[in-house]
Image: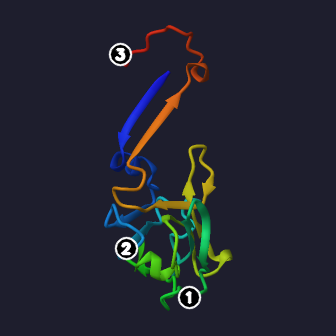
Amino acid sequence: MEWVLMERHQMMKMMFPLAISMAPENATASDEITITLDVNKSCPAGALMDADSVMMHSGVTLDGAAWQNVVAFDGVGGDGQTPKMMSNGDTWSITFVPVDFYGVTAGEVTAINCVFNGGAWDAGEGKDTDAEGNCVDFTIPLGGMDTYKWMITFTPADYYDIPEGSVVTDD
């Protein structure tokens, strides 16, 4: 058996979507954040490369339930802001305070769930890529240093077909 213990900031870097950056990195749902999408790294490849505009369709993970308080790509957030992103060349960004944008008045927000499009669903879509290469919804973790302070991964030897009592090294 293998136990991996890592601090939350290490886990965040592992879990953070490749095509997304967020400033500040360890923001909470009450902080003003800027989410930036790199269309060169979103899935499917090249779908938003020539987009004239990019819109975010999103919600939050609230008390463990994903896609709550959804703000549609053609809608308006709880703070009156539209989910239209600003062009920075090959990247697009949007700045907002999650609890205000999603109209959260109670509960714990631990992530933003989102996908992007070119202003309509038939105008190209931008998603994350999973381990198998499939296009999946983005999950952008939030919470600062107190949420998910530690992550422990248990890997059973049976999964890797390692006989019990074997010594495994990194040589």
Rendered residue at 38%/35% (across/down): 5
Residue position marked by numbered label 1 in the rendering: 76
Which element type, helix, strand or loop, lies under badge 3?
loop
Residue 162, given in percent of the width and then of the height, sits at 55, 14
| Residue at the front extreme of this rendering | 106
Q: Identify the disc placed on residue 171.
A: 3
Give the amino acid at mark 1.
Val
Residue 56: image x %, image y %?
A: 54, 76
The residue that disc 2 covers is 34
Q: Is residue 71 above or below residue 165?
A: below
| Residue type pointed to by label 3 | Asp
Number of residues whose C-alpha sits closer than 10 Å to that of mark 3, classed few (under 14), some (14–19) or many (20 or more) = few
Q: CA distance from mark 3 to mark 2?
A: 42 Å
Q: If you read the primary sequence from the N terminus, does the residue marked by circle 3 or circle 2 appear first?
A: 2
Residue 90 visible? The answer is no
Number of residue marks: 3
Which quarter of the rendering shows the C terminus? top left
Task: Point out the tag, 2 or 1, that comes first from the N-terminus.
Answer: 2
Q: CA distance from mark 1 to mark 3?
A: 55 Å
Using the image as rendered, state which of residue 167 and residue 126 is in the foreground: 167
Nearer-N-terminus badge (1/3): 1
Type of amino acid under label 2: Thr
Q: Residue 153: horizontal and vertical position, in percent?
A: 48, 35
Q: Residues within 10 Å of mark 2 (few under 14, many from 20)?
A: some
